Image (spheres, helix red, strand yellow):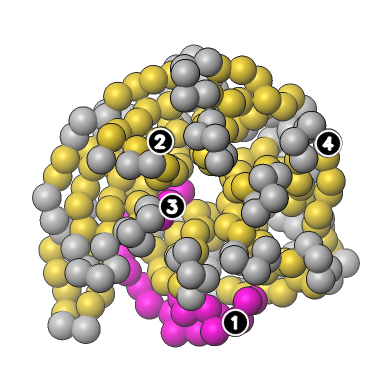
Amino acid sequence: MKKHLILLLLAGGLVAAGAQEQGFERVLEGFSFTEGPAVDAAGNLYFTDIPESKIYRYTPDGELSVYLENTDGANGLFFDAAGNLVACAGGARQIVRYDADGGKTVLLDKFEGKKLNSPNDLWIDPDGGIYFTDPRYGDTESMELDGMDVYYFHPDKGKVTRVIDHMTRPNGIIGAHDGKKLYVVDEGEDEFYVFDIKKPGKLENQTRLLYEGADGVSIDDAGSIYVTAEKSILRYDPRSGLVRRHELEVRPTNVVWHDDVLWVTTHSGEIWKKAL
């Protein structure tokens, strides 16, 4: 059941949400369904249009271009340490990597010999390993795996491990910069969790942070977490436990923080931003 009041699970009990804010600007529109925002070292914004199977690039100078076509329904994006763009190709049921020239490498498409469901979102840890969510939306008859779970895969080591197997439909995922915490949205339950990362691919101490959270998640340089909700972005400060709601006019799908700006993709095929 969707909760209309945001609650935090803290050691001292339940705490009501913080203040509300506005101030978003719509900068791009006319797409079908935008997702997967990621920013490279030069400040270029990349995002996906899932139904059109395209990845776009939007420069700091305001120039928009198609970066890649025929992406097999690419969804979540993340840049690795070498500057390669890693994508969840949900339609192809793969994790793929694109080099600077657009060359494609399939990194992973199976777990224990069975096809992945439909990889949705990912985070690359400081060791170069990839945590990714693997839900399925729509038809589930072609699913070969026995659940919608979260996995860890290291491209250099070739080993994939299922790290979370009890969520209804995991979606957004991000980790702390020091690699010690993993944040995951269970979109199927409208809940948001944090896990301690004992070592790469090994999680412990699950804690529910929010009873609200629908899709994408990001993190800023100070460690504050941004998670999408119904027509808003929730900002959670792990140090104080405070939550602030940044209101939107539309329903967001995902969010990325870069250089004191929040970039937001939406169900209505737009790109919004907010300076913080």
Check the image and report above or below for 190 versus 33. below
Q: To which residue does mark 1 refer?
A: 199
Tag 4–tag 2 contact (CB < 8 Å): no
Q: CA distance from mark 4 to mark 3?
A: 27 Å
In depth, the one of 245 and 178 nearer the eye is 178
Magenta stretch mostly in which secondary structure?
Answer: strand
Of labels 3 and 1, earlier in sequence is 1
In depth, the one of 109 and 39 nearer the eye is 39
Q: Is residue 127 left or right of residue 185?
A: right
Amino acid tagged 2: Trp
Tell me where residue 64 sits by quadrant.
top right
Q: To which residue does mark 3 refer?
A: 217
Task: Identify the residue at image location x=74%, y=67%.
Answer: 154
**Residue 77: horizontal and vertical position, in percent?**
61, 44
Q: Quadrant of the C terminus?
A: top left
Of labels 4 and 3, earlier in sequence is 4
Q: To which residue does mark 2 refer?
A: 263
Give the magenta-colored segment's residue range. Answer: 195-219
Q: CA distance from mark 3 to mark 1?
A: 22 Å
Disc 2 secondary structure class: strand
Q: CA distance from mark 4 to mark 2?
A: 26 Å
Task: Identify the residue at image location x=34%, y=38%.
Answer: 261
Q: CA distance from mark 1 to mark 2?
A: 31 Å
Q: Nearer the viewer, mark 4 or mark 3?
A: 4
**Residue 118: horizontal and vertical position, in percent?**
69, 50
Q: Nearer the viewer, mark 2 or mark 3?
A: 2
Q: CA distance from mark 4 to mark 1?
A: 31 Å
Tell me where residue 73 sits by quadrant.
top right
Q: To which residue does mark 4 refer?
A: 103
Of labels 4 and 1, earlier in sequence is 4
